[in-house]
Image: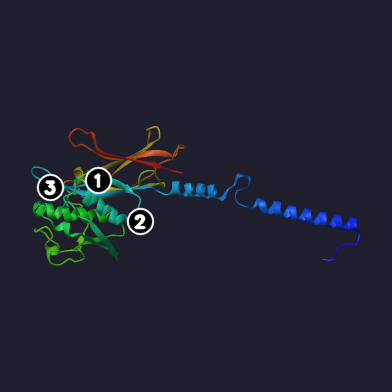
């Protein structure tokens, strides 16, 4: 750069250069981490906190257990809350075999689950073959408890078992009565006695449409299922009834829809129940909180 000949002019030029340098540093400084209290790390931590708060920490699954009485044996369906996982099918079977109510032998582990075209294959550890002393009916129900637990998921239609990677030899005999000779196994709710009613749609706190679609399973007298929708104050918005595909002692599916005029509150409760043939009382009621736009 050629210097100006006049000294005053030179001093002004250098002053302008220095001022421009200061402005550059200030502007650059505004974008550096740690300025004005806007450090990158706290901002990142805040973002991570928001992501963590929106990510579900728990999830609900339905598990089937065997229950014995003095003169009968049957299945019961119970809800369990487990930590959120991507391997939900494996977690569901683990919840079954590790629960205090299970009839699976102590120490049974779920080594793996594979899914192929609707068929779930469960690979158990060798402990699953330990003698359970539950008889033929208990063995059949124990197998069905696992099958029904897995076929709760819409992408699983059939279930097969393996032991340490094989379904032959000792694995084929299973617990010594029914065995695995006819696998894969299908879903079968005919031996599920409790609860008498459950609702599969809508789920708890679901945003529902109008009309409201209602689906479920029932083991009730003549298959008659009563349905009622309440607003947030408990007033009846609409009610109806439908009939399951089978009446007790069988179990059947039901599906219907309910029209209603949604109030401004946007929240309410769906009640599904049966009426006692003896005294007309409401029995086996299931309450599902719902929302609407």
Residue that carries the numbered disc 2 in the rendered image: 86
Please name the residue shown 74% across and 52% down the image. Answer: 22
For residue 231, what is the image quadrant? top left
Give the number of the disc on residue 73. 3
From the top left corner, tell me how far across and down residue 66 is, in percent: 17, 48
Q: Are marks 3 and 1 in contact (CB under 8 Å)?
A: no
Foreground residue, 45 or 66?
Answer: 45
Q: Secondary structure at mark 2?
A: loop
Give the number of the disc on residue 78. 1
Q: Secondary structure at mark 1?
A: strand
263 relative position to 90: left or right: right
Could one spot residue 252 in this view of the protein? no
Foreground residue, 46 or 199?
Answer: 46
Looking at the image, is mark 3 or mark 1 earlier in the sequence?
3
Looking at the image, is mark 2 or mark 3 earlier in the sequence?
3
Foreground residue, 204 or 32?
Answer: 32
């Amino acid at each position: 750069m050629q210097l100006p000949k006049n000294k005053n002019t030179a001093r002004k030029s250098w002053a302008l250069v220095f001022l421009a340098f200061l402005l550059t540093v200030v502007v650059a400084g505004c974008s550096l981490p740690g300025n004005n209290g806007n450090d990158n790390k706290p901002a990142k931590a805040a973002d991570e906190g928001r992501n963590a708060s929106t990510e579900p920490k728990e999830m609900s699954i339905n598990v089937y257990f065997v229950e014995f009485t003095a003169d009968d044996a049957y299945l019961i369906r119970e809800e369990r809350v487990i930590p959120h996982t991507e391997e939900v099918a494996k977690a569901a079977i683990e919840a079954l075999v590790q629960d205090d109510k299970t009839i699976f032998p102590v120490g049974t582990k779920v080594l793996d689950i594979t899914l192929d075209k609707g068929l779930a294959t469960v690979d158990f550890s060798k402990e699953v073959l330990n003698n359970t002393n539950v008889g033929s009916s208990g063995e059949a129900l124990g197998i069905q408890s696992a099958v029904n637990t897995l076929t709760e998921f819409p992408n699983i239609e059939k279930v097969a078992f393996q032991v340490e990677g094989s379904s032959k030899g000792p694995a084929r005999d299973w617990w010594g009565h029914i065995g695995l000779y006819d696998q894969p196994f299908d879903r079968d709710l005919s031996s599920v006695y409790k609860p008498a009613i459950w609702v599969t749609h809508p789920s708890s706190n679901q945003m529902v449409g109008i009309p409201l679609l209602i689906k479920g399973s029932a083991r009730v007298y003549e298959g008659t299922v009563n349905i009622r929708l309440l607003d947030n104050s408990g007033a009846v918005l609409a009610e109806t009834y439908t009939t399951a595909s089978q009446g007790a002692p069988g179990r059947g599916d039901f599906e219907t829809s309910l029209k209603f005029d949604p109030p401004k509150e946007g929240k309410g409760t769906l009640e599904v129940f049966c009426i006692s043939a003896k005294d007309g009382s409401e029995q086996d009621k299931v309450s599902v909180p719902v929302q609407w736009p």
